[in-house]
Image (cartoon, coloured by chain):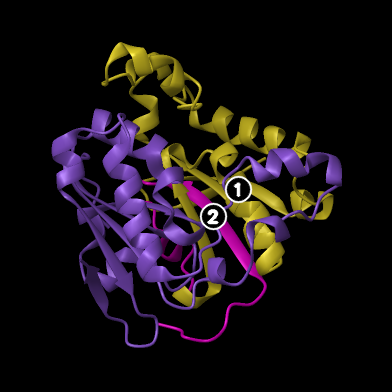
Chain colours: A purple, B yellow
Amino acid sequence: MSNTPLTQMHLSVTCNDRRCIPERFFNIQPGEVVVHRNAGGNVRHALRDIIILDEVLGLKEIAIVHHTDCGTLRFRDEDIRKTDSRYWPEIDAMHIGAIADVDRSVGDDLEWLGKTPFVRKDLIEKTRGFIFDVKTGLVSPVV
Amino acid sequence: MSNTPLTQMHLSVTCNDRRCIPERFFNIQPGEVVVHRNAGGNVRHALRDIIILDEVLGLKEIAIVHHTDCGTLRFRDEDIRKTDSRYWPEIDAMHIGAIADVDRSVGDDLEWLGKTPFVRKDLIEKTRGFIFDVKTGLVSPVV
């Protein structure tokens, strides 16, 4: 594992899913990528990290990678309310982010990122969307 | 890479840093761990995922892993304001989460998680803190 200082680099935003390992599906060495992983790979929840990483490291590009057979396809936001109902409003405000279609969710994320004032325009232009197919192991760009 | 359905499992919460790959530092197979990665491995920002993953998969345990030489040691929250100053209040509200001491930050995260009403008490009891030393490659528990 590389132990060199952090430099400018690529950020992959992808899912918690145990199969979503950017170092594997992009076939890159561990030292070459910084990674944000959240449920679904939802870019809204990566915004804090994009801001921090771009400030501290200077990001070259971002890849948003959602995947087939994602757990976020299997519920609706309002299902995620295991706790006491008095906490439901706070949970609902978290943007749980269930998705209905993986192609569309990547496009939605690119569109959302394109509108945020918190990210440099030239970094937004260097952001691409992908779908990782867990059956084939292949990553395809979303046009 | 495993392509079996998701089951109950371990969640690692760790950093974006390119050296923070739980599958490596815990020496486990890719199919055995779901992973949340954010800047610093701050558990507050993993809360949405803990709620979703526990609902969808049922989590067995959580490991919060911060690391030496972390980028979040190199700034203060108020440094992260690259954009137009009219957006600073929104950025300040994001809990950027600069840290001053890695041992303390893991303890703070365990304490914070212990107080949230959004996570099952028995899952909180199965949550442990660790520090990953990027020089030695070793992960040590925080007591």
Chain letter of mark 2 equals A
Mark 1 element type? helix
Q: Position of residue B86 (x, y in %)?
A: 35, 13
Q: Position of residue B127 (x, y in %)?
A: 69, 51
Chain letter of mark 1 equals B
In the rendered image, which quarter is residue B116 located in? top right
Looking at the rendered structure, which numbered label has been put on residue B48? 1
Q: Nearer the viewer, residue B35 or A29?
A: B35
In the rendered image, which quarter is residue B143 located in? top right
In the rendered view, tell whether residue A57 sits above or below residue A76.
above
Q: Nearer the viewer, mark 2 or mark 1?
A: 2
Mark 2 vs 1: CB contact within 8 A: yes
Can residue A88 be seen in this snapshot?
yes
In the rendered view, tell whether residue B45 sits above or below residue B73.
below
| Magenta extent | B1-28
- Give the quadrant of the N terminus of chain B: bottom left
Q: Nearer the viewer, residue B103 or B70?
A: B70
Looking at the rendered structure, which numbered label has been put on residue B125? none
Q: Residue at x 31, y 12 (%)?
A: B85
Specify whether B45 is left or right of A125: right
Instruction: Please tell me whether residue B21 belongs to the stretch shown in magenta.
Output: yes
Mark 2 to mark 1: distance in Å? 10 Å
Residues packed near mark 2 inside 10 Å, few (<14), some (14 to 19) or many (20 plus) = many
In the rendered view, tell whether residue B50 sits above or below residue A51.
below
Q: Residue at x 43, y 44 (%)?
A: A44
What is the three-letter code of the residue carrying label 1? Arg
Q: Position of residue A30 (x, y in %)?
A: 26, 60
Q: Which residue is mark 2?
A: A97
